[in-house]
């Protein structure tokens, strides 16, 4: 388990997707690369696939702020993929707090809008949200 020894000023934002919530903190620091700690684990442990690591790191690549922040995240709820997208949303919002000039870039990349899609509720008389029981004419 990784511990962060960063103290001082940070930028905090919340990102959401489906039922996932990610509380993101960005600590400014000078280093050769970004440091990600998600629920006390390194990004390589928490998000095993390259696709999810790309999703999480995409706000930094879009805004050209690679290697300027140490990122700590508390992610809850949902699945691992929706957590990755919630982290991306939170990082984008936190980057906006650090520099308002990034708004245009992040908005064009559609990283500031919360994705509203979620599972539809099941209705009575149906098997799933829209699937009806088999119907027989005779």
Image (tube, grey):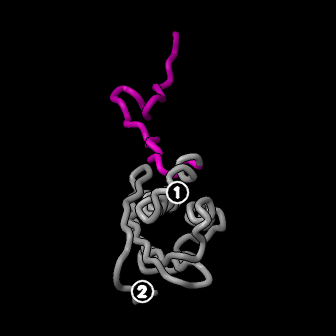
Q: Earlier in the sequence, mark 2 or mark 1?
A: 2
- Looking at the image, can residue 108 be seen? yes
Which quarter shows the N terminus? bottom left
Segment tinted magenta in the rendering: 109-138
Query: Circle 1 sits on which residue?
Result: 102
Where is residue 73 drawn, in percent x and y? 42, 71
Compared with 63, 27 (above or below) is below
Dot 2 falls on a residue whose secondary structure is loop
Q: Residues within 10 Å of mark 1 (few under 14, many from 20)?
A: some
The reply to whether the magenta stretch includes residue 62 is no
Relative to 129, is 8 on the left or the right?
A: left
Question: At 58% across and 46% down in the image, what residue appears?
Answer: 108
Which residue ends up furthest to the right in the rendered image?
Answer: 50
Residue 16 position (above or below residue 118): below
Q: Residue lying at the far top in this picture: please name it.
A: 138
In reply to whether residue 114 is colored magenta, the answer given is yes
Closer to viewer: mark 2 or mark 1: 1
| x, y percent for residue 83 | 47, 60
Q: Main secondary structure of the magenta part?
A: loop
Residue identifier under label 2: 4
Q: Give the residue at x 48% y 78%.
A: 70
* Residue under the point 53% across and 80% down: 35
Looking at the image, which is closer to me, 129 or 113?
Answer: 113
121, 25: nearer the viewer? 25
């Amino acid at each position: 388990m990784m511990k962060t020894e960063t103290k001082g000023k940070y930028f905090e934002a919340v990102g959401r997707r489906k039922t996932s919530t990610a509380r993101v903190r960005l600590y400014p620091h000078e280093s050769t690369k970004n440091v990600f700690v998600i629920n006390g684990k390194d990004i390589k442990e928490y998000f095993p696939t390259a696709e999810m690591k790309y999703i999480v790191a995409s706000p930094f690549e879009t805004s050209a702020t690679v290697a300027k922040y140490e990122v700590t995240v508390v992610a809850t709820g949902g699945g691992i993929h929706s957590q990755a997208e919630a982290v991306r949303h939170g990082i984008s919002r936190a980057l906006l707090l650090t520099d308002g000039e990034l708004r245009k870039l992040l908005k064009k990349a559609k990283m500031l809008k919360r994705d509203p899609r979620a599972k539809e509720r099941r209705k009575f008389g149906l098997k799933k949200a829209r699937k009806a029981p088999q119907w027989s004419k005779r």
